[in-house]
Image (tube, rainbow, N blue to C red):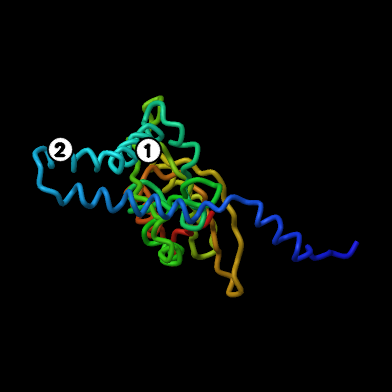
Amino acid sequence: MPIQRADAAIVQASSAELPDLPIPTFAIETVLGLAIALVIHSNFRGRGGVRTAMLVPWAIPTVVSASMWQWMYHDVFGVVNDLLVYRARCCNPIRGEEIVGYVTRGKGVAVHARSCPNVQNLLYESDRRIAVEWSRVGDDSGRAQRYPVKITIYCDDRTGMLKELTAVISDDNTNIRGVDIHHDDNGEAIIEFVVEAEDLRHLNRMVLGLRRVQGVRTVQRTQKL
């Protein structure tokens, strides 16, 4: 069925039936504004109290808004907390890194590492940027929370290499979630570990131990899992 345009006469008639509110609203606001201005600049006893009372309507929304946000993000009964706050997959930040929050559309607050390249791309909407910080160490059972991190190792393809690398990781009381091994065009082994790191210090200690293994050329963290 072809789309038909509304007849101009019908549109005009419908518009004419609407109440003409802008003009009286503007007049009332103008009169009230002038009256308030005259009262504020007049000299009379109790002028300070009147001025203060006039500021109350502007102060109340601010106080209510601040209280609402404090209640929503309360550590115990906050309705936002962990439900709408998540670590961004592009940089996968872990405890110890400087972080910044970004209010997404419909997905909550995405937490990025401050060094994440995407953070620079989000600066054009500074009003959606929010300050965040890491929560207290430990979960409900008292154990330190761990974060999945991918580590890529470029090394010699020799017997016992995988055994030595896994020993370094395990000796640091680190769980290994997954391992993927492949080779480049030069026959060099590329081993990808997904490990559970407690914080940035734990991760750096682990990387340092891996670099000491004979035959290891490069150890780097892959930001995206």
Indicate the position of residue 75 as horizontal and vertical percent values.
36, 31
User: Which label number is shown at residue 133?
Assistant: none
| Res. 72 visible in picture | yes
Instruction: Choose mark 2 or mark 1, whichever is in front.
Output: 2
In the rendered image, which residue does mark 2 sit on?
Answer: 49
Q: Nearer the viewer, residue 188 or 56?
A: 56
In the rendered image, which residue does mark 1 sit on?
Answer: 69
Instruction: Tell me whether the residue at label 2 lies in contact with that at label 1, contact meaning CB atoms closer than 8 angstroms.
Output: no
Indicate the position of residue 142 as horizontal and vertical percent values.
36, 27
For marks 2 and 1, the one nearer the N-term is: 2
**Distance (Cα) linking label 2 and label 1:** 30 Å
Q: Nearer the viewer, residue 1 or 173?
A: 1
Q: Quadrant of the N terminus?
A: bottom right
Tag 2, which secondary structure? Answer: helix
Q: Is residue 193 left or right of residue 43?
A: right
Q: Amino acid at mark 2?
A: Gly
Q: Amino acid at mark 1?
A: Trp
Q: Which residue is depicted at the point 30% across and 40% down?
A: 57
Q: Which residue is depicted at the point 49% across and 41% down?
A: 84
Q: Nearer the viewer, residue 168 or 196?
A: 196
